[in-house]
Image (cartoon, grey):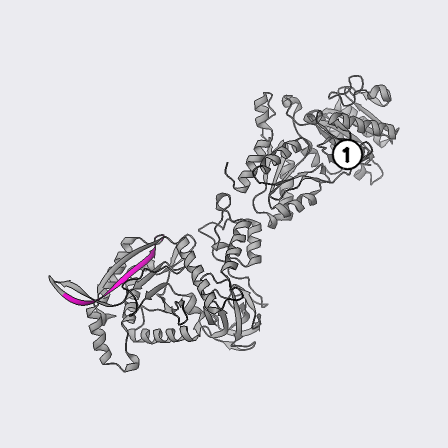
Amino acid sequence: MPKMTYRDAVRAGLREALSRDPRVFLMGEDVGRYGGAFKVSYGLLDEFGPERIRDTPLSESTFVGAGIGAALGGMRPIVEIMTVNFSLLALDQIVNNAATLRHMSGGQLSVPLVVRMATGGGRQLAAQHSHSLEGWFAHVPGIKIVVPAVPADAKSLLLAAVADPDPVLVFEHAALYGVEGEVEDEAGPGEIGRALVRRPGDAVSLVTYGGSLAKVLQAADELATEGIEAEVIDLRTLRPLDIETVLSSVRKTHRALIVDEGWRTLSFAAEVSALIMESAFYDLDGPVARVCSAEVPTPYARHMEEAALPQAATVVRTVKDMLGHDG
Amino acid sequence: MPILTADMSAGTLVAWHKQAGDAVKRGESVALVETDKGLIDVEIFVAGVIEKLLVEPGTTVPTGTPLAIVREAGGIAAAAGVAAAPPPAPRVAPPPVRPAVGSGRLKISPLARKLAADLGIDPGSVRGTGPGGVIRREDIEAAAAARSAGAPRTGLDRQGRLRQAIGAAMARSKREIPHYYLSHTIDMHRATAWLADENLQRPVTDRLLYGVLLIKAVALSLREVPELNAVWRGPEALPSEGVHIGVAISLRGGGLVAPALHDADRRSVTDLMRGLRDLVKRARGGGLKSSELSEPTITVTSLGEQGVESVLGVIFPPQVAIVGFGKLVERPWSVEGRIVSRPVITATLSADHRVSDGHRGSVFLDALDRRLQEPAAL
């Protein structure tokens, strides 16, 4: 299987979607001539032309709204928002229009819109660009939230999002763009709403997604050197959430730790924790734990930023505390 | 199924003395149960009419399992061995749960609690090893493994099982109870002289053994140091209302039981003597009652005439003290500067240091000595 970076995998997905369906087009800030703020769409303008790779003004509300209109008109728009922080300028379009139109029209309208955006910290881009707000969007019925953590998912879940008849938000963790992984050429669309066990284990279930997956897998490897076999679950989709995969793991390990780069209060981790409590209470051998970001605007200084975000060492320490291990 | 012996986790219902529809009185024997310590008559603690028998003879069930439903006078149905349920519909109440430790609830994970219920383990008796002392799955599993290690195994006869049961109770005692030991030699010449005189006036069948004087003297002395007459529940001892003295009785094939002489402080020595003879007979021949096995509040052990001069007993949980007597021996004794020969006995106290201190223990042995110098008042 060929190896490629997460960035190239997203581009491969975009190229496949653009090639397969003439209704698909990409628009957003600097996606055309500049090749995208994260260089995801680099080269696509030459390949597909300015009709289908469209630079937009710096107005998230406008171009997301235009995407909703195009989707209502029968197109398959893919809208790129530079980072999740800026997506708040389009919150009205996403929450009040995209998410509601099928419901409010009694099923007559469909909004097959894809909104891609970078999320998360770890690259010293400070409080302007580094937050993880996918948990906010996951609160809203009517939209789907996918959070690919590996290059293969970045491509296959993007294709699934394009194929979906309803609005799908794709959150690409900014720290992942340079990460390499195996991606099948002919894999086709993935399945939205299905979590995966990335590493089997029996001591504790580590539930995570997106940019935290690699850190959690690293923590699991460290724990394994001390005889603690952690099971790692990659949620891959926050809405609809595949809680069954989480529950069946917890029923095996009897302990769960959720690792989520969002702030702790009202985090997505809180939702997963509540669902585990509701459905697997009598399987729990200890309280569900969370490792989330510190409740501060993401700091710029490297050491401060590292301290604010979930890290593998924090996961290792928390798991040991849960199990009552020393050290 | 009541807990009839320490660490009993299950019992076999051998026979019903009553059937559905029979009226029962409080304290009446209703069923015969086989335990590690032999066949025990189970007494009922409510009066009423047996509505339904729930367990077939020959069945082994965990302790806490309802054996029968009794409709109390007034129409309230209760499951024997468990608390009464409210009217109108007869209902089986859940098995009794040991009170939570201290003022707070038991610290136990949901999984461990469920597992404990499934395995018939009392979580209150399990020590938690999780963070902050929480009881977790592995603690319950360890308790279950320990129980099955101590439970009847096929191929073991009653004798072997009795040995195991004693071993389990004594191991638990030595593991959990910080014992302290005191010893005191008591001049018995007044007691033996009074006894010889008294027995001359009694018919042979009513003659007293000095052992019964010791039991009565222990019972009365406990009034002065009541903290020794208690049962351990969680982090503290609950003082007992009555003085029910467990009398260690050795069995012919080996092993021992210690059934209770109830209210020993309030009964005459004559009555206690009859009670003691009856207990010894039934302990060796079968027919001890459930209350006799489960209710002692302190134990007295005496090695008797064949024994040695002193015995330091191991406390029988959940009691908090055991009093030991060696054999009565003639020894040189100093009285007002002269050496005389006196019958003396060495009394020992093994007590739980969580509940009492050596000072209180010595007050008890001192009281015991004083009372044995006034045998007529016993």
Looking at the rendered structure, the number of numbered marks drawn on it comes to 1
Magenta-drawn stretch contains A59: no
For this rendering, which residue is in front, B40 or A144? Answer: B40
Q: Which residue is depicted at the point 54% across and 74% down? A: B50
Quadrant location, the N terminus of chain A? top right
Position of A237 relative to B356 (above/below): above
Between residue B96 and residue B130, name the one nearer to us: B130
Q: Is residue B350 magenta?
A: yes
Q: Where residue A60 sits: x, y (%)?
A: 75, 24
Q: Nearer the viewer, residue A107 or A251?
A: A251
Q: In this rendering, is residue A54 above or below B46?
A: above
In the rendered view, does B220 fall on the left or right side of A286?
Answer: left
User: Horizontal placement of B255 versus B114: left or right?
Assistant: left
Quarter of the image where one finds residue B6: bottom left
Asked if residue B291 can be seen in this view, the reply is: yes
Identify the amino acid type marked 1.
Leu
State the residue position of label 1. A157
Q: Position of residue B202 (x, y in %)?
A: 25, 81
Residue A293 image-quadrant placement: top right
Are there few (<14), some (14-19), or many (20+) residues within 10 Å of tag 1? many
- Give the chain of mark 1: A
In the depicted structure, whether residue B190 falls above or below residue A131: below
Q: Quadrant of residue A317?
A: top right
- Identity of the residue furthest to the left in this view: B337
Looking at the image, residue B3 sits to the left or right of residue B196; the answer is right
Q: Which residues are magenta?
A: B340-354
Residue A51 pos. (x, y %)? 87, 21
